[in-house]
Amino acid sequence: MADRLVGGQTREEDAALDRSLRPRKLADFVGQEKVKENLRIAMEAAVQRGEPLDHVLFYGPPGMGKTTLASVIAAEMGVNIKVTSGPAIERAGDMAAIVTGLSAHDLLFIDEVHRLGRVVEEVLYPAMEDFFLSWVMGKGLGARSINLKVPPFTLVGATTRFAAVAAPLRSRFGIVYRLDFYDQKAIQELLRRSAAILGVEAQPEGVEEMARRSRGTPRIANRLLKRVRDYAQVAADGVITGEVAKKALGLLEIDDLGLDQVDHQVLSAIVEKFDGGPVGLETIAACINEEADTIMDVYEPYLMQLGFLSRTPRGRVATRLAYNHLGLPYPDRSGPPGLQKSLWQEQQA
Ligand code: ADP
């Protein structure tokens, strides 16, 4: 998978940045007002009843703050958080060991929860529902069935792919939130907060320039800020003005909307090789040498958010806006009947 500056997934350079910029309290968590409000009520009610918070599922594109929110919940509730991920828990016994190691009301955060194996999920169900573990240890004649009570805990699951979470698991989460792209105002607020923490002066025009290219994604906003800060320090007098931000971001080959070369490749493949679509996801993936899952989870959501791409039952279609952005004329679809036209009409129907 391409290692992109404007990808929402974690890169090595993010680790140190994450530590300093990651909000610890709900009040520092920018945007997502509805989610915060609902969480606040749910947390308070749980504390009043002396119960753990109901199990929570966060879904949305990478870099939106799912992991951050999980640690914010733990901090707000004054409990410990154990962080793991779906692919890291291979056997039923691993899951049992993790859950038995929790204290009452602790948070268990499972990233990529859609990648848990079936057998592991089955251990989780009674644990989530009745705080009861039941699994078989060993194999054959030596196999033993183990049943034990576990402390009441809260499972916080995160996924980029809601539909891929097994239905029985999904239904066991009492609280489900979608973390969507942040609006410009929220991203600007986030950039101002981060700039203040990093001790760099960012003028409003500079903040605007960075926000516009951040793809509505906190992780990308912080990453761009860091790059622009370096540029300001080396090539200007340390202040992020509109001009400085524009020049720094120009060097990074990110266009006005935050699209990089891979996004352009996706759009160009559809437009140039397949007349704008519809074209299947696998075909696009093969054209640009990328995995179909990565295109679906990482590239497509933002292109769809911009209205550049639409998903149809027959495949992906590039919209008029995408043609405009690429500087290409939008084809006249009302020409003489042909294969392309009939497909188009079908899709419009
Ligand atoms: P995800 O788990 O959805 O991939 P993260 O929680 O790891 O995303 O968020 C990536 C980074 O973006 C975090 O380190 C944090 O610094 C920042 N971040 C995310 N959401 C917010 C927010 N709402 N306010 C401030 N910073 C945020």
Image (cartoon, helix red, strand yellow):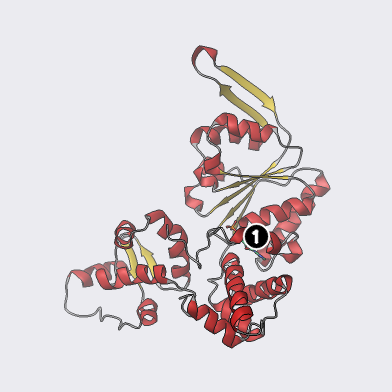
Counting the numbered discs, the total is: 1
Give the image location of residue 55, x and y in percent.
Answer: 66, 46
The residue positioned farthest toward the bottom in the image shown: 243
Give the image location of residue 53, x and y in percent.
Answer: 72, 47
Q: Which residue is mark 1?
A: 16
In the rendered view, would you say 93 is above or below 314?
above
Ligand 1 visible in quadrant: bottom right
Q: What residue do we see at 29% from left, 62% from top?
A: 287
In terms of depth relative to the viewer, which is nearer, 298 or 118? 298
Q: Is residue 208 visible?
A: yes
In terms of depth relative to the viewer, which is nearer, 103 or 10? 10
Residue type at mark 1: give it: Ala
Say which element carries label 1. helix
Q: In the drawing, does residue 38 fall left or right of residue 206?
A: right
**Label 1: few (<14), some or many (≥20) within 10 Å?**
few
Give the image location of residue 176, x and y in percent.
Answer: 61, 53
